[in-house]
Image (tube, rainbow, N blue to C red):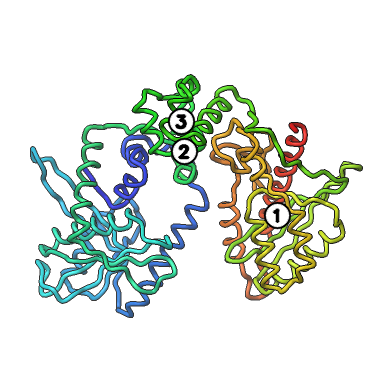
Amino acid sequence: MLVTDELLFQYKRCHRRAFLNIYEENNQKQEEKDFIVKLRQERESHSWQVLQTYNLPYHQPKLLVEDSENNFQVASMTENLMRQGVDCIYQGVVIYTHYGENQEKIVFETSPSLLIKQNIPSLLGDWSYIPVNTHLGKSMKPEYKLISAFQGEVLSLFQGVNLSESQIFLRCIDKPYYLNLKIWIPHCRELIREFIFMVSGKNEPDVFISRQRCSFCQWFESCHSLAKSQQHLSLIPGITPKKYDSLMAEGINNLASLCEADLSELIRLFGNEIGNNIHQQALSLYHSQAIFRHPIITSIPTNSIELYFDIEAQNFDYLLGVLLVNNETKEKKYYTFLAENIEQEKEIWLSFLELVNQYPDAPIFHYSEYERETVKRLAYVYQTSSADVQPLLKRLFDLHKFVTNSFFLPVENYSLKSVANWLGFRWRDPVTGNLTSGYHTIGGDQCVFWYDQWLKTFDRETALRDRTWLNYILIYNEDDCLGTYQLKKWLSTQI
């Protein structure tokens, strides 16, 4: 049996993902999203930056021919470097073989970002190595600590020395977090026991769909299909693992049984508001129809000219997109205000103001609080007068807030993608020209990747970048505006 830090990391975040990566054929996976590739590259870059902070000569074990499956060769080279006593090893692999009960062979494999030499004797000589790991998170998470503890445990066994600490570098932090291995190794051992029990017994974990954790997983379509066939409770917005366990304990194990459940029992479990919301949301999904939450008090503004507003941002707000809809002529025109660097942000802000001020009576529809907060931020940063900003803020109308306050919709979450897709709207894939849906729906994460690619295409001779990537983003942003427009049209027919 093979136990790696990557498999343990996956297991901590999602038992099922680790199981499928071991037992399912890789051809059942979806293609890895570009955004995940970008994150992997960023982590490598982050590790390289951390390497520079130590200012040590380093060695990197490499194969002459790249072979991601042949970590045993890399481990052999890493061990040779450790026995030589080099100061620092970059992207090394350490393997330790353990024989458990019934002489079961367990191979522990770990790949710390760095191995740093310390003057503490071990089986290697008058020195030993501590693991240093890098992560892109901005705050410390339990899985980071557990994986570093695993690395510390494997290195302790491999070197014949009890390591007392390991180090973790987070994104944008130039100093390491020192992890007390005496505290965290016992937690890690329990995680390993659970993992081995699952793998050795081939105990396939239940499916649980979590929008945040599942959306980038290559097994998403497989798990989602299974969850749909089971009418799984996790497909209902607002059902957390804790609420799921509470419902299961009451014998409520799928969408149909939740719809049939006694409302008073749900209120007893979760309180009046949450219990009622869960029940109504389940009914909406089960019957595939919208349900009014309560009498709608707020009306949706309507005008001959309407504006639909969406922002793309990455470190700064580089694209303000506006769709102008003329309800009298049925014409639509898409305007873009694009900053190719942060110095141009003020320019696009002023140009945006110039456009929207041409239509002082036009409501400005958007989907999320982000657009309102960005308007406030840009107005503050660029010292826009209150006389210009306050009327603009009054014209902003958040359709997300309106929808979630007014309806239960037959959707699995209330993102613009889910709601607009339910209405029949589809985002274009700018690369292929195809319409997208499901796991392959173009999202904001893809824009992050495209923007990053655009930054990388700088031509020193022409001092220009390849605008193909920016054009992809413009198409995506226009579809965001069109999706918002589609939603507003539907809402206008409901009230």
- Position of the N terminus by quadrant: top left
In the image, is 131 to the left or to the right of 244?
left
Q: Toward which corner of the image does residue 296 lie, by quadrant?
A: top right
- Is residue 201 depicted above or below 350 in this figure? above
Secondary structure found at label 1: helix
- Disc 3, disc 1: CB below 8 Å? no
Q: Amino acid at mark 1?
A: Leu
Q: Earlier in the sequence, mark 2 or mark 3?
A: 2
Coordinates of residue 70 in the picture (x, y in percent):
29, 52
Label 2 crowding class (10 Å Cα cut-off): few <14, some 14-19, many 20+? many
Q: Earlier in the sequence, mark 1 or mark 2?
A: 2
| Residue under the image location 11 percent in, 45 percent down | 99
**Separation of residues labelled 1 and 2 (CA atoms):** 27 Å
| Mark seen at residue 267 | 3
| Mark seen at residue 474 | 1
- Disc 2, disc 3: CB below 8 Å? no
Label 1 crowding class (10 Å Cα cut-off): few <14, some 14-19, many 20+? many
**Separation of residues labelled 3 and 1 (CA atoms):** 46 Å
**Separation of residues labelled 2 and 3 (CA atoms):** 32 Å
Disc 2 target residue? 220
Judging depth in this view, the residue of 374 and 392 nearest the camera is: 392
| Mark seen at residue 316 | none
Q: Amino acid at mark 2?
A: Phe
Coordinates of residue 90 in the picture (x, y in percent):
31, 68
- Position of the C terminus by quadrant: top right
Coordinates of residue 79 in the picture (x, y in percent):
19, 64
